[in-house]
Image (tube, coloured by chain):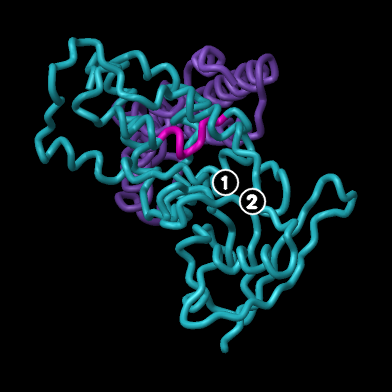
Chain colours: A cyan, B purple
Amino acid sequence: MPEARFHIKRFDPKSGVGAHYDEFTVPYEGSLTVLEGLFYVQEHFDGSLCFRYCCRAAVCGSCAMYIDGRYRLACQSNVNHLKGDVIVVEPLPHMPLVKDLVCDMSEFFAKYETIKPWLIRTSQNPEKELPQTPKERLKLDMPVDCILCGACYSSCPSVWTEGDYLGPAALLKAYRFEVDSRDEARRERLPYFDNERGVYRCHTIANCSEACPKELNPTEGIQWLKRAAVRRRLFGRLK
Amino acid sequence: MRPEAMARHQGGMWPWLMQRVTAVLVFVTMAIHLTATHLLNIGDLSYDNIAGRLAHSGMALVDFTLLAAVVFHALNGVRMVWLDYSLAGSGRRVVDVAFWIIGVGVFFYGAWALWPWITG
């Protein structure tokens, strides 16, 4: 039976011991995801191991971690596809740590909320649905897949140095609604991203696009928002 | 952080936009400057040649534009790096004012050096 060796970063603020790594060997048959490995460790070796998960299908974004030097979702990382003898599992870097693999996401979601991540309508809603053409829907294909895992936010050097910067996830969501033909926010959402703590803090480093486990491109969305902000302020275009 | 607090952070468009505009200006004027200086006057960077070149009002305009664009682009770039390290409130304004003073000072120093060539 094959075995997977996990090197897991541990941290418990109450223990008084600093961050360290524990090693566990997990037997498996066929295939094993990192999340399944963590379950095994929790059930058989150390019940105090702390990590977030929910859907186990790469949809909820809860189990984003830094696995073998890359941002990945634990639930969709198959150990057979990871190279090396030891699988190093760490929490998202540059985030406040709660315990073991669990980060404090409160600032991430507070920033996310500032860009009003919902459909804003000013005109009367039709009785049934708000139809879109396939071309209009195509614009949403990329940003709509964001699962708010925080990998992009954790990987962004502008976030590391500027605590107030909104970060790629919030701005990608702003882009998602700004390109939506049904959204009528016009100037309402603009002040929240059109500033130096918003889109202009992005230096197109593109770490976010590289880190995204869903292979989205937040950098592209942020660049679109910059152009849109300039068009709106200089030429008065609203969309 | 509340949305109202985020909306208070205004500005940022002009430094970002002007960085792009000056990049294009530097590219164009630098190309003209280098062509005029090193291709049309190969190996002959004499006082008379430079004086003759700058006597043309078009070339003087190119060199002044190049000077202004380079100074703005360089200092604005350094300022952006600086601001990445969270200079909030009054500290930020100090940096902005300091860079403007340095920029205007450097531009006028450059203009002062160019002026005698242009006026002959």
Is A170 contained in the magenta span?
yes
Residue at image position (73%, 60%) is A47
Q: Position of residue B65 (x, y in %)?
A: 38, 28
Can residue A141 be spotted in the picture? Answer: yes
Please give the residue where the numbered disc 1 appears in the rendered image. Answer: A154
Instruction: Tell me: residue A181, above or below residue A61.
Output: above
Q: Position of residue A42 (x, y in %)?
A: 68, 63
Query: Which image quadrant for residue A7?
Result: bottom right
The answer to whether dots 2 and 1 both sit on one chain is yes
Nearest the viewer among A211 and A104 is A104
Q: Position of residue A131 (x, y in %)?
A: 12, 29
Q: Residue furthest left?
A: A133
Please give the residue where the numbered disc 2 appears in the rendered image. Answer: A93
Q: Secondary structure at mark 1?
A: helix
- Asked if the residues shown at circle 2 and circle 1 are in contact, with their CB atoms under 8 angstroms apart, the answer is yes
Q: Position of residue A233 (x, y in %)?
A: 32, 16
> Which chain does the residue under circle 1 lie in?
A
Q: Residue furthest bottom?
A: A1
Amino acid at pointer 2: Pro
Specify start and end residues of the magenta stretch as a single range: A165-171
Instruction: Tell me: residue A121, above or below residue A149.
Output: above
Instruction: Tell me: residue A113, above or below residue A61.
Output: above
Residue at image position (34%, 26%) is B61
Residue at image position (25%, 31%) is A179
Residue at image position (20%, 24%) is A182
Nearest the viewer among A180 and B104 is A180
Instruction: Tell me: residue B51, above or below residue A236.
Output: below
